[in-house]
Amino acid sequence: MVVINFLKRYPVIPTMIYALLIFTAVFAPLISPQDPYKNSLSDRNVPPIGIEGSKSEYILGTDPIGRDMLSRIIYGARVSAMVMFFSVLIGVTVGTTLGLVAGYFGGHIDEVIMRVVDVWAALPIIMLAMVFVLIFGPSLIMLVVILALMSWPGPVRLVRAQTLSLKNMDYIACARISGASSIRIISKHLLPGTWNIVLVAATLNIGTIILTEATLSFLGVGIPPPTPAWGAMTASGRNYLNDAWWVAFMPGMCIFLVVMSGNFIGDWLRDRLDPSLRQLN
Amino acid sequence: MKQFLIRRIFYAVVAILGGTLIIFFLSRASGDPRVLFIDEYGGGPGDEVWEKMGRELGLDKPVPIQYAIWLKKSLTGDFGTSLALQRPVITVLKERAPASLRLGVAGWIFGTLVGIPLGIISAIKRGTKWDYLARTFALFGQSLPTFWAGIMGILIFAGIFEWLPSGTMGEGGFSIPHLIMPAIVLGWLPAAGYLRLTRSSMLDVLESEYIKLARAKGVRYSVVIWKHAFRNALLVPLTYSGLLLIGFITGTTVAETVFSWPGLGRLAINSVMGNDFPVVAAIMFFTMLLYVTVVLFLDLIYAFIDPRIRTG
């Protein structure tokens, strides 16, 4: 009973899934049982352990050109984790800075920043991403740039709203009277007050980022092959659904679990840190 | 109200101009448009023709003027010729649009008809198993990768049970069974969004004083829910519809790819793969136009319903 209540109150399982993702991403070469690029034509579409015809060296089976699924999923975690980390970092940093500036200075600066945010939100990001890939060619850096471009407007809105309510407080007026510069007020007095919002915005972004990365790689505009990425792996299983369902099933399941954990933790954090946004459970 | 109207329309125009500017620069960044006329053997127009084409396309003029020419052409529906299909872009788009529209409407119907009622039930029966079921549905909708849900749907309902067809629009172009799976896959994410927003805004409204007063006066519970609470709670999901549209554009691209649906989304993907930039630019242009217009209308409706918005 105690255990169940604990699980209900804290997102233990989602956190464990994230810990596992990061662990796998960091130690991929050490824990992957096989070489993710090595194909063996005699071992095509071998089913996972427990299904007739499986082989003991391929725990999760093999893909249509005989590469080990488990090793590819482990290396795929690397791509997801890397893309997630860098794009969230860049997107949230830029978004927070602009949100603070827009909220603090107000007036024309605010107006310009918010109009740009509006225009940006109006662009279909998947299509934009495809155009970027068309022009500059697919690569990991390209992908991070695209996803960072996607993730900055959300934090701007949230941080700006928080800044607007903070900047009229007495302690900000006191800081100004004592001669603090704008930069000092923003970085020392306003930024700490927005940490909660920033954290929530970042966590809620993670799910969307991973989902978009997977979608792009599914559509063939993500990281170029043969680097294993979960979305592209799902796509490669599409034509083998009748013979080898696991090829499409396994990587998709990984995406689903990771995104769901991200959403779960994000919601939980939001309820915890920001009562005004609470979903009234 | 009038001032508010003018301001909102001005913003919409600025947003459209900004968007077209981005599309214009991307289309120029993709290369000199004349390069497209060079054939696969490296042969192409001679120097004189090359210069003449440049003058016709306005390439000898400064960039701002080039932009103005491009914008004028785009606004009159002239997007040039598709490189892959060798036909005017606008004709190709007109052919493909109905299929996307049909899928979009079907997905939207699913999202609304499932999301909003489930959100209300979830709020009224808060804390019960119905609430948990509805919220699990929402969590799945937000976390399932659309393409994977589609593929698994094909595997289960078309492969194992053979209840539904696995893709395409079907013979004759309109078939309900062909529409079911793509519509659900496309509508699940918006349904989840509607559900969560309806639920939280319904809970907010149900807590308010006027609901308590109505209940205290002895108004029947169902009347309070539908007549007093529901109307006010619907405002929040309404504003969400703009964001929903953006999700839809991504969603249709994926759903059309998975289910071999002959719409604009698939056209966009194929054009990107085939370096067919005029088509891509045109699709981006219309998507943006559509989005800005819808958001403008929603803003106006919102202001019309809620006076606090237009004064504040």
Image (cartoon, grey):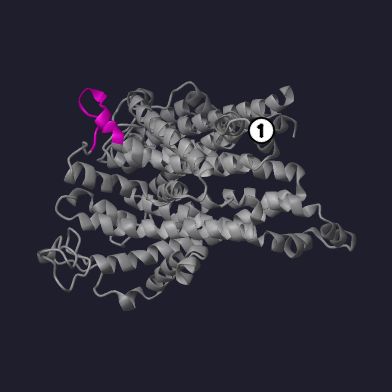
Residue B79 vs residue A152, the one in the foreground: A152
Residue B155 vs residue A155, the one in the foreground: B155
**Residue B290, how many percent across, how many down?**
50, 29
Q: Is residue B121 magenta?
A: no
Disc 1 is placed on an element classified as helix
**Residue A104, how many percent across, how many down?**
75, 52
Q: Which residue is mark 1?
A: B214
Quarter of the image holding residue B293? top right
**Residue A126, how many percent across, how many down?**
43, 44
Quarter of the image holding residue B171? top left
Q: Is residue B174 magenta?
A: yes
**What span is in magenta?**
B167-180
Count of marks, rendered view: 1
Q: Is residue B81 visible?
A: no
**Residue type beneath disc 1:** Ala
Q: Is residue A188 visible?
A: yes
- Going by the image, does B65 lie left or right of B39? right
- Going by the image, does B43 lie left or right of A25? left
Give the residue drawn at x 32%, y 33%: B83
**Residue A18, how many percent across, how many down?**
44, 67
Question: In the rendered structure, the residue with mark 1 lies on which chain?
Answer: B
Return the residue found at the far bottom. A30
Give the residue drawn at x 34%, y 35%: B183
